Image (tube, rainbow, N blue to C red):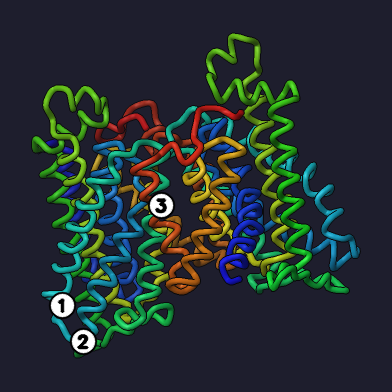
Amino acid sequence: MLAAQILINALVLGCLYACIAIGFSLVWGVLNVINLIHGSFIVLGAYLAWSLYQGLHISPWYSLAVAAPLFFVFGYVIQRLILNRVITAPVLVTLTLTFGLDLILNNAMIYYFKADYRKLTLTPPMGSISIFDVVVPVDRLIATVAALALTGVLYLILRRLRVGRAIVAVRLDRDAAVLMGVNVNSIYAIAFGLGAALAGCAGVLMALIFPISPLTSTAYLGKAFVVCVLGGLGSVSGALAGGILLALIEGVGSTMIGPAHATTLSFVLLIVFLILRPQGLLGRKGFE
Amino acid sequence: MTRANLILLALIACIAALPLFGGAYTLRLGTIACMYAIMALSWNVVGGFAGYPSFATAAFFGLGAYIGGVLLARGAPLTMAIPIAGIGSFLIAALLGAALLRLRGHYFAIASLSLIEVFRELVNNATDLTGGGMGLNIPLAASAGVMADATFFFYLMWGVLLVTAAMVIAVSMSKLGFGLSCIMQNETAANMVGLNTTLYKSIAFGLSACFVGAAGGVYAAWVHYIDPSDVFDILYSVKPIVMALIGGLGSPLGVTIGAFVYLGLEEVVWRNYIQIHSGVLGVLIVLLLLFLPHGLTSLRGWRLWGRAKNV
């Protein structure tokens, strides 16, 4: 039963991890930028859900619809005004720039929301269901389904929409995409906006499950790193595989050698993967 | 020796006169200035000479602080703890470098960032040895008063800075430095003409960790208390990069001046905007990268010092 519980927990948590990482993976894959603001976007999304619930009693499920367009515009503007100026610079510059932006956003959040840990508690609580001794909290389950749905939406956008195909084209071969008449700057901004929107939505879902504080942003960012590297960069299925693998390793690791070592384990695995299999589990060039 | 390197040594010699002019606060700033200069110069070996975007400075600073701190807490003398912190950091970095430096670009950046997390978590969990999250208290050496202590630690940090500068100048004049700049320009070609790139990169990575580790050891002895979230702070990795970008990447004199300029900015921000200091720091970083991509040298059409290599 313990094994089944660990497996279910890993599946539930893994889908959430995938949702955290997918926007990060999109930005890294398309813009070739390691986006360190991602963690703070997630926390900001969580604060949005918390504020809407506390202030206006809007259920987090509806907050998703608010967060997505808001964060898309936010990300689009940041990319157009700031990041786009150094987009061709080497990783040192772009990474340091996003670190600077992260400092600003994180400090702003500490200033307005304080560093206290907060929790969005639904009233009445949704309880949990148990099937054969395997217990799953309902809010976690719904958050997982929503995370899967968000991942699916991104998949459909990239697969079906004209703009999605253009994003994939830019990722595959930037120069050829320019020659085919794709406006690369606009695609970059849209991809960054999509990444931010996914981060914001992931934050709304995280608010249901984890405590909220600006200090948690680096933990989310770390998860995004590991999931991206494990699963392979820039593919939706890779992010899902990486997320579930990470959750599974953390779950098994916590049970076997204690929860304190779960983070160490995941980062050691990250470095091992980088050295031995940098393309990840399902890595291939381009979104499917 | 080039003129820029002579100016660098002269500049460091001038700093040694600081205790003649200032009180305890000036000495504290001077000690931090030396520490930042050590970090920036060390980072420059792997980041500026070899062109690898390393974010591992904080990892080795923390490692050195903990090696030094644990030894001091167990009663080892300072003269033993600091060299061991430096040599230990060198060995660990050179070994890790042999594996990590096979990665390039974004992957290397991510791996070096992750080193900080790995080391921090390891220290956090080795509670018996390091005190874990509670931190580590380092016993006060027999104190001869506030000013005497401040002067002592200032000269200790200054000494490490002097050795670091000598190392960087020696590297830049040696075959190693030549090899590293070959690696920066075209690693595959450098490999093809028979340069042992793995060895060169590992030595560079080890050297860049060695003196940062020693500085970490001095820092631990100086502040008497360290904890994992303090010494394994990602900011310690980003600050040297910002300093190098301010002063001009690749030039030892440039990055040292960058370190001093950065410290000045940081101190002004810290004193005046304590609540939003990290946000203001972020704004400074963003403005620097957007408008002064080649550091202070891009303020004028002509170059002020050294040859600022393109980023």
State which chain disc 2 sits on: B
Residue type marked 3: Leu
Rounded to the nearest whole Å, what is the CA distance between mark 2 and mark 3? Answer: 34 Å
Residue type marked 2: Ala
Residue type marked 1: Leu
The first of marks 1 and 3 along the sequence is 1
Give the class, few, some or many, for how many residues have Cα within 10 Å of label 1's Cα (few <14, many ≥20): some
SS for tag 2?
A: loop
Q: Nearer the viewer, mark 2 or mark 3?
A: 3
Q: Which residue is mark 3?
A: B113
On residue B78, the disc is: 1
Q: Which residue is mark 2?
A: B141
The first of marks 2 and 1 along the sequence is 1
Rounded to the nearest whole Å, what is the CA distance between mark 1 and mark 3? Answer: 30 Å
The first of marks 2 and 3 along the sequence is 3
Decide which of B195, B179 is in the foreground and name it: B195
Please say if the residues under marks 2 and 1 sit with CB atoms less than 8 Å apart: yes
Q: Quadrant of the N terminus of chain A?
A: bottom right
Q: Do the residues marked 2 and 3 share a common chain?
A: yes
Give the class, few, some or many, for how many residues have Cα within 10 Å of label 3's Cα (few <14, many ≥20): many
SS for tag 1?
A: helix
Give the class, few, some or many, for how many residues have Cα within 10 Å of label 2's Cα (few <14, many ≥20): few
Q: Do the residues marked 2 and 1 share a common chain?
A: yes
**Residue A36 % position (x, y):** 54, 48
Residue at screen point 30% across, 31% down? B309
Rounded to the nearest whole Å, what is the CA distance between mark 2 and mark 1? Answer: 9 Å
Residue at screen point 59% across, 14% down? A178
State which chain disc 3 sits on: B
